[in-house]
Image: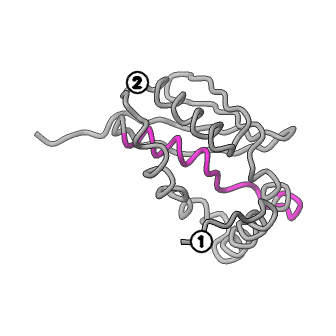
Amino acid sequence: MNHKTISLDYANSLVYELEKAFWDERGRGARFRTTTVGREYFEDKCLPLLQSADLDDILHTIEDVLQHEEIAGKVSYDREDRLLRVRVDGCIHWQVEEKMMALGIEPFTCVPANLIVLAIEEKLDRPVELAEIKPEDGACHLLLVVFDQRPTLG
């Protein structure tokens, strides 16, 4: 396999064009089709590191991966009952969001959010919904809703 490194500008230009094409095809419905973008990356880089079923530990593990892999500069969060507010600073995909916003398209997918959602769903068996992405001052403010554990038939 070729391990050549490509430029971030090139990768983000492709991500932008794919997102834009998907938006043109599906509009707001695109957000419901992109919730698992990053699953392979999650399974490879994040899942092996998730040892605890404690929500704070899960969040710190994903934060560590995002920083170690240089996907985000800083990740912080605040929990309020079932609401999880996450701030992602220095995301490598910020320029994609800027281009989408310049066209009046609200952000509809976020890989760091998806990694958090996948981790919570995997370790806690609780559904999570990305309710909002608000880019502001170079950071994305995410609102995640963590629902109760799925009922089991027994």
Query: At which x and y percent is residue 57?
Result: 47, 25
Give the vertical position of 152 relative to 24 (above or below). above
Q: Is residue 104 magenta?
A: yes
Give the vertical position of 41 relative to 119 (above or below). below
Tag in front: 2 or 1 = 1
Classified by dominant secondary structure, the portion drawn in magenta counts as: helix
Outermost residue to the left = 154
- Residue 9, by quadrant, is bottom right
* Residue density around tag 2, few if under 14, some if 14–19, many if 20 or more, within 10 Å: few
Q: Which residue is mark 1?
A: 2
Q: Which residue is mark 2?
A: 54
> Which residue is depicted at the point 45% across and 41% down?
119
**Pointers 2 and 1 in contact (CB under 8 A)?**
no
* Secondary element type, mark 1: loop
Q: Which amino acid type is marked by label 1?
A: Asn
Query: At which x and y percent is residue 17?
Result: 75, 72
User: Looking at the rendered structure, which numbered label has been put on residue 45?
Assistant: none
Query: At which x and y percent is residue 16?
Result: 75, 66
Q: Which amino acid type is marked by label 2?
A: Asp
Distance, label 2 to label 1, CA atoms, is 38 Å
- Relative side of 81 to 100, left or right: left
Q: Which residues are magenta?
A: 101-122
Q: Coloured how?
A: one colour
Tell me which label, 2 or 1, sits earlier in the chain.
Answer: 1
Q: Quadrant of the C terminus?
A: top left
